[in-house]
Amino acid sequence: MPPTIRDVAREAGVSVATVSRVINGSEAVSDEIKDRVLKAINLLNYQPNLSARFLSQKKHPFSDDTKYVGVLFGEYVHSDHYFFSSVISGIEKTMFEKRLNVVISSVSQRDNYTPLDLPLFIAEKSLKYLIVIGETDPKFLFYLKENGFIVVMVDDIGPIGFDCVLCDYKRGALEAVEYLINLGHKNIGLIAGAEHHYFSRALENSYLKVLQSHGIPIRREYIVYNEDFNVDGGARSMEKLFLLSNPPTAILTNDEMGIGVLQKANEMNISIPDRLSVMGFDDIEMARFFHPPLTTMKIPGSEMGRLAAKLVIDKMQENEPLPAQRIELSPILVERKSCISLK
């Protein structure tokens, strides 16, 4: 299997986003970091999506006889997060098999979109096919469509008429809360991400639905929103929950925030799982190596990336436009050692 952008990031000791910036020739990267990334590219014999030779050439990297597919990160996507890295890996591997190149960039939400606000390959319409990862401003999606781009979305429902590949977070959260209740937990905390993010909304809706179906009182103080989907955010939220007079006996969150919960619990001398059960969502690589190993709902990120890439490839080969497709994959329960039965 050829090396991926994640392998380069690991070798260089930087994030996937930083590797992407170097490959795209961004000036927001120091010379020292750029040298490390380029050395890693050469060491691994990685064929970048915008090959390293373009970094030293003045000519436009896209040519008529080479096929490129753009990958855009939405507002809340952290490309060095394991889930999004696995999505990118699935896209890259599938495109590599078809000898298609991938160009990676990001876009922020704005009131109006002008060429100066956009990645070069969008502003100059250098390619036609795009995969957009994560929750994205519908105005921007319609801007792309009106300007002739073919868009496939990953991890965002998006407006009607757009192809999308999703994970059924609602179903996964239903199963996760049922799992904790079946272990005897009634005081269950929820550490969600940004309040308006669709992942957070899906978790909260399922959480409330399951508690209500079991006749368990809703305690709003058990729901903590967090703009940071990361370890530090999880640790801060855990501390907030344990300032309550009657803290939860179990917490549902995503894996990165869950690891933050485990770390903060260790600092506070709260035994996991004897005093607190912790359940994650994602199944990031670190989850199984932490102490205790994290019980979680596995999201098939690489498969989501593969299916999104396949939709793009199918669109390249179709003679007539096909109806928009919605592909939804289900999370899978992975039982480890971070949850305990109270029965």
Image (cartoon, grey):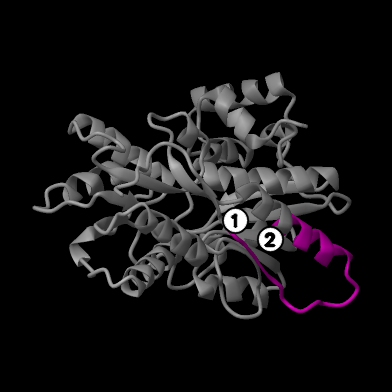
Q: Name the residue under label 1.
A: 72
Q: Mark 2 points at which residue?
A: 130
Quadrant in which residue 122 is drawn? bottom right
Q: What residue type is labelled 1?
A: Leu
Please give the name of the residue rendered at 68% of the width and 35% of the height, measured from the top-left corner.
4
Q: In the rendered view, tell whether residue 188 sits above or below residue 277.
A: below
Across and down, in percent, residue 281 comes to 46, 50
Residue farthest toward the front in the current orientation of the protein: 343
Q: Earlier in the sequence, mark 1 or mark 2?
A: 1
Please give the name of the residue rendered at 78% of the width and 48% of the height, measured from the top-left corner.
95
Badge 1 marks a residue whose secondary structure is: strand
- Is residue 237 toward the left or the right of residue 104 in the image? left
135 or 22, which lies in front? Answer: 135
Label 1 Cα crowd, 10 Å radius (few <14 / some 14-19 / many 20+) = many
Give the residues drawn in magenta, as a range.
308-330
Across and down, in percent, residue 248 comes to 22, 52
The answer to if 21 sits in the magenta stretch is no
Please give the name of the residue rendered at 81% of the width and 66% of the height, measured from the top-left corner.
315
Across and down, in percent, residue 226 comes to 30, 55
Across and down, in percent, residue 79 comes to 52, 45
Q: In the rendered view, tell whether residue 142 sits above or below residue 26.
A: below
Label 2 Cα crowd, 10 Å radius (few <14 / some 14-19 / many 20+) = many
The answer to if 327 sits in the magenta stretch is yes
Q: Which amino acid does label 2 sit on?
A: Leu
Q: Quadrant of the N terminus?
A: top right
